[in-house]
Image (tube, rainbow, N blue to C red):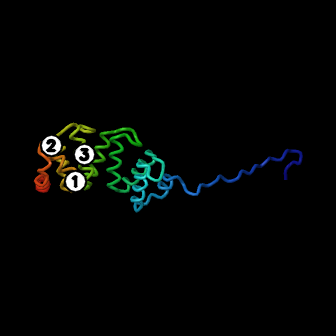
């Protein structure tokens, strides 16, 4: 037993920290990284990017896109590439954006192939190259991206009335 003359240590009991009803979105996503959740991560990331039903939070959106990309989601890879190109929610890295777009396009993402054609056509994140732009536009057209046909016609200097023949060319070259 202790000496009665010594002052007894004061023990202060603090109430337990208040637990939120739900964890913040990116923390809850990071605590349960199951590959089956990629569609939910992508959906939440799109909401955060657009501010639909919530406050825009680009950094959190990029975190969710990164999680979905690591789980193999090609749509998330495309959106992450666009974020890197523009510096939305992350430092601007055009070459990193082109890299993401290329990986998505090679996996069969039509919009990524089209955007990659735009990058090469205008020299954004990649050297300006009409040959590579036409290559990616043809890939996008073969994947039935509607604007790819028009871009091919514009590069060739043809009027948009020639659109049916551009579709045939795109199908034969892919």
* Residue indicated by mark 2: 155
Task: Give the CA distance from mark 1 to mark 2.
Answer: 15 Å
The location of residue 51, given as percent across then percent down, is 44, 49
Q: Residues within 10 Å of mark 2 (few under 14, many from 20)?
A: few
What residue sits 65% from the left and 52% below the top? 17
Q: Residues within 10 Å of mark 3 (few under 14, many from 20)?
A: many
- Quadrant position of residue 87: top left
Count of number-bearing discs: 3
The location of residue 150, given as percent across then percent down, is 18, 48
The location of residue 66, given as percent across then percent down, is 39, 50
Q: Nearer the viewer, residue 93 or 46?
A: 46
* Residue indicated by mark 3: 116
Q: State which tag comes first along the sequence, 2 or 3.
A: 3
| In this rendering, position of residue 118 left or right of residue 164 | right
Q: Secondary structure at mark 2?
A: helix
* Residue indicated by mark 1: 146
Task: Give the CA distance from mark 2 to mark 3.
Answer: 15 Å
- Quadrant position of residue 132: top left
């Amino acid at each position: 037993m202790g000496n009665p003359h010594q002052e007894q240590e004061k023990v202060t009991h603090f109430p337990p920290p208040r637990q939120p009803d739900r964890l913040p979105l990116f923390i809850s996503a990071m605590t349960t990284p199951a590959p089956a959740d990629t569609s939910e991560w992508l959906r939440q990331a799109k909401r955060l990017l657009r501010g639909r039903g919530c406050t825009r939070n680009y950094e959190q959106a990029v975190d969710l896109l990164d999680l979905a990309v690591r789980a193999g989601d090609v749509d998330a890879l495309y959106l992450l590439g666009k974020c890197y190109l523009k510096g939305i929610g992350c430092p601007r890295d055009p070459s990193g954006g082109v890299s993401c777009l290329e990986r998505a396009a090679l996996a069969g993402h039509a919009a990524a192939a089209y955007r990659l054609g735009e990058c090469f056509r205008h020299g954004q994140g990649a050297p300006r190259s009409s040959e590579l732009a036409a290559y990616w536009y043809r890939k996008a057209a073969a994947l039935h991206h509607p604007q790819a046909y028009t871009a091919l016609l514009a590069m060739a200097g043809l009027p948009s009335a020639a659109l049916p023949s551009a579709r045939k060319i795109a199908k034969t070259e892919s």
